[in-house]
Amino acid sequence: MKQFIPALTIIGLTVAAAITYVIADNLIVALLLATTAVLVWGFTSIGDPPPRSENTPTPRAIKTYRKQHPGSSIGDAVRALRN
């Protein structure tokens, strides 16, 4: 149930904004509720993060590679460490 709290909060705030605008005819409060819904949506992640593939190098390995090979980009380091 805990995983649904952000989604339910976003839906609830959006519905509250619509009801506030239509019934109470209060644009300021409706915009504040809608803005809060967008902020909650932007700062939360819904669902599980994507899994890391087995051959993805760690950030530490990328940093070490770039120190050993000055001028290489992050993409160069990732491609070199995957092989």
Image (cartoon, helix red, strand yellow):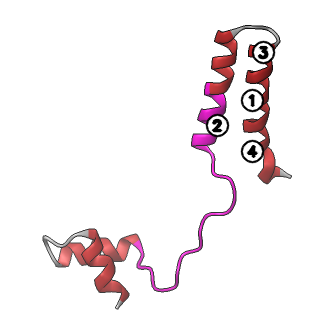
Give the residue at x 78% y 15%. 22
The secondary structure type at the circle numbered 3 is helix
Gap in angstroms between the C-alphas marked 1 and 2: 9 Å
Q: Amino acid at mark 3?
A: Val
Give the mark nearer the N terminus: 3 vs 1: 1
Q: For mark 4, what is the residue?
A: 7
Q: Which mark is residue 13?
A: 1
Nearest the viewer among 21 and 4 is 21
State how far apart marks 4 and 2 are (Cα). 9 Å
Quadrant of residue 83 in the image? Answer: bottom left
Residue placed under numbered mark 2 in the picture? 40
- The earlier-in-sequence mark between 4 and 3 is 4
Labelled pair 1, 2 in contact (Cβ < 8 Å): yes
User: x, y (%) of residue 29?
Assistant: 69, 13
For residue 53, above or below residue 2: below
| 39 displayed left or right of 64 | right
Which residue is more in the foreground, 66 or 46? 46
**What residue do we see at 79% from left, 32% from top?**
12
Task: Quote the CA–CA distance across marks 3 and 2.
Answer: 22 Å
Q: Which residue is more in the foreground, 37 or 22? A: 22
**On the image, which quarter does residue 26 sit in?**
top right
Return the residue at label 3.
22
Seen as rendered, the residue at the extreme top is 25
Query: Which residues make up the magenta segment?
Result: 35-58
